[in-house]
Image (tube, rainbow, N blue to C red):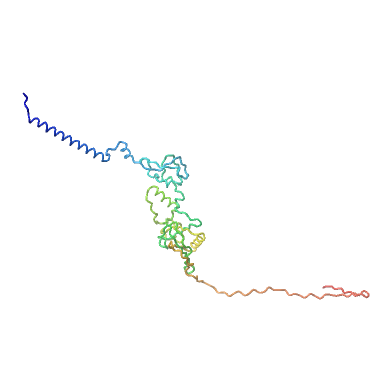
């Protein structure tokens, strides 16, 4: 005879329900975790990704062939490659524009990074401006405090005033009109413009911010422009103007006789102006009045002596008469 245990069956049913509920909850948690992981970016990179992040690469310019000293670099002679940062020199060139048309100061083997000190910038890069056809580039050196020297920038239009001394009078005259400014920069005595521009370009290639040269103490008075030899302070501006050949001749004469100052002009000012000069009439100093010279005397003429009368001889031959004339 079997005995039924009602309490035991009820307990087994409750246990099955609990297990089923737990399974459903676990399935929900697993599904939620799967969706969360799927939506979240991968936080466990592969070994290759870890290696790529650890080794930083830098783009540098390298030679595609063996380059010789004194060669002019072309676009076909170089290319850009990515090298590990620890293999790249600190002064390696990273800009193709700096290398193109530059002159090599040293030999560069193939696949070797080009360095800043190995390059001499091309003349086009050093000059940074081009003189228009038919014009001339004339350089003026002005103190900061004279004319419009400290205000000028490349592209401005200026007039040039020449001043000179005539006895006790100062004569000022406009000798150039509407000249375009090609260069306007600080001038450091004893340092050539080529060296200044070369250092500026190399600084850009080395990814440094170039700074314009500041005025410094002059090294020698002979390096200063004429008329500034006794100042000892380099407070000068170098101004290159695009002028006609005739205007360049007038500027050269003005600098020989005195000074030349620049003044700004509006780029839309095309109004013709008469020749400006102050004073308009230059006073004549130490003028000596002299009487006009007497007219020249007529040349002396020798008196004309009359010819002596001829001597006549009469000869009779029978009934014939003949006269013979003899001169004295």
Residue 220: percent from left, percent from top: 44, 56
Q: Is residue 128 above or below residue 247?
A: above
User: Residue 198, percent across and down?
Assistant: 43, 50
The image shows residue 168 at horizontal and vertical percentages of 47, 69
Asked which quadrant contains residue 61, the reply is: top left
In the figure, is residue 188 to the left or right of 47? right
**Relative image position of residue 54 (x, y in whole percent):** 31, 39
Closer to us: 151 or 133: 133
Compared to 304, does 15 lie above or below?
above
Q: Quadrant of the N terminus?
A: top left
Residue at the right extreme? 318
Query: Which quadrant of the rendered structure holds the C terminus?
Result: bottom right
Q: Is residue 42 left or right of residue 230?
A: left
State the residue in front, 191 or 239: 239
What count of labels does the image hold? 0
Quarter assignment of residue 35: top left
**Near-viewer residue (271 or 176):** 271
User: Furthest residue to the top?
Assistant: 1
Q: Nearer the viewer, residue 234 or 204?
A: 204
């Amino acid at each position: 005879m079997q005995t039924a245990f009602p309490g035991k069956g009820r307990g087994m049913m409750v246990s099955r329900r609990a297990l089923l509920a737990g399974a459903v909850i676990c399935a929900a948690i697993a599904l939620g975790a799967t969706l969360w992981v799927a939506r979240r970016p991968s936080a466990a990179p592969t070994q290759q990704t870890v290696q790529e992040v650890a080794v930083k690469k830098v783009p540098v310019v390298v030679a595609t062939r063996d380059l010789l000293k004194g060669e002019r670099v072309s676009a076909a002679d170089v290319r850009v490659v990515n090298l590990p940062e620890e293999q790249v020199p600190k002064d390696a060139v990273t800009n193709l524009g700096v290398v193109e048309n530059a002159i090599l100061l040293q030999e560069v083997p193939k696949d070797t990074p080009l360095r800043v000190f190995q390059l001499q910038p091309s003349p086009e890069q050093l000059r940074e401006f081009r003189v228009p056809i038919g014009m001339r580039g004339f350089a003026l050196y002005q103190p900061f405090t004279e004319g419009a020297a400290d205000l000028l920038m490349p592209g401005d239009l200026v007039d040039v005033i020449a001043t000179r001394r005539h006895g006790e009078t100062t004569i000022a005259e406009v000798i150039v009109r509407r000249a375009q400014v090609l260069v306007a920069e600080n001038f450091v005595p004893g340092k050539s413009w080529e060296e200044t521009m070369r250092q500026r370009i190399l600084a850009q290639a080395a990814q440094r911010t170039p700074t314009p040269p500041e005025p410094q103490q002059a090294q020698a008075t002979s390096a200063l422009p004429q008329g500034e030899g006794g100042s000892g302070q380099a407070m000068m501006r170098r101004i290159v103007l695009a002028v006609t050949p005739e205007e360049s001749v007038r500027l050269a004469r003005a600098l020989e006789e005195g000074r030349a100052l620049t003044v700004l002009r509006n780029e839309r000012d095309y109004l013709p102006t008469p020749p400006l000069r102050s004073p308009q009439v230059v006073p004549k100093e130490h003028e000596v009045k002299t009487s006009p010279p007497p007219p020249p005397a007529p040349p002396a003429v020798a008196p004309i002596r009359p010819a002596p009368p001829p001597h006549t001889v009469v000869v009779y031959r029978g009934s014939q008469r003949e006269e013979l004339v003899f001169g004295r």
